């Protein structure tokens, strides 16, 4: 996570106490697909493919409750390890600790997110 735009570095500085956790989740995302783009969107470190920010894939969020990896269309993803949590129409998340314990499963979720980038629920 070097060579970030200023806005990403500023956000990371604001969350200096959680920077290692943020970095770990971002590295999991990039390990799954090194071609993904990252930028600050919605006060989260957000990832997408092909410059399509309307259909973003996932994001690292840092809140008072902790750091988590959020999948925009997580409801569409096959999650046999049952890592994802959430009850909204699309959004699902996994906490930092569970994500880093399951790097292969996270990589598969990221690859599925790319495959379902523009899919919608019926």
Image (spheres, helix red, strand yellow):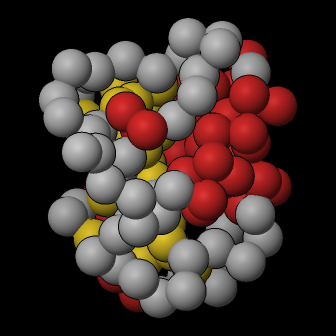
Total number of numbered labels?
0
Q: From where the camera sits, is residue 99 visible?
A: yes
- Viewer-side residue, 35 vs 77: 77
**Relative image position of residue 85 (x, y in whole percent):** 37, 18
Q: Quadrant of residue 45?
A: bottom left
**Relative image position of residue 24 (x, y in whole percent):** 66, 42
**Relative image position of residue 75 (x, y in whole percent):** 37, 33
Q: Is residue 25 above or below residue 7?
A: above
- For the C terminus, the image quarter is top left
- Viewer-side residue, 68 vs 22: 68
Q: Is residue 13 above or below residue 99?
A: below
Q: Quadrant of residue 13?
A: bottom left
- Viewer-side residue, 98 vs 20: 98
Residue at image point 68% right, 34% down: 106
- For the N terminus, the image quarter is bottom right
Residue at image point 82% right, 31% down: 104
Q: Is residue 72 above or below residue 11?
A: above
Q: Is residue 83 above or below residue 19?
A: above
**Relative image position of residue 115 (x, y in whole percent):** 61, 59
Would residue 5 appear left or right of 34 to someone viewing this image?
Answer: left
Would residue 7 appear left or right of 60 to someone viewing this image?
Answer: left
Q: From where the camera sits, is residue 16 visible?
A: no
Furthest toward the front, the residue is: 122
């Amino acid at each position: 996570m070097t060579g970030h735009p200023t806005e990403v570095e500023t956000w990371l500085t604001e969350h200096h106490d959680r920077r290692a956790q943020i970095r770990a989740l971002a590295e999991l995302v990039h390990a799954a697909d090194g071609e993904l783009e990252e930028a600050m969107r919605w006060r989260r470190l957000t990832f997408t493919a092909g410059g399509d920010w309307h259909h973003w894939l996932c994001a690292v969020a840092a809140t008072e409750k902790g750091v988590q990896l959020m999948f925009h269309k997580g409801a569409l993803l096959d999650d046999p390890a049952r890592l994802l949590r959430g009850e909204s129409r699309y959004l699902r998340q996994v906490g930092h600790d569970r994500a880093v314990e399951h790097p292969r499963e996270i990589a598969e979720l990221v690859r599925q997110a790319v495959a379902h980038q523009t899919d919608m629920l019926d």
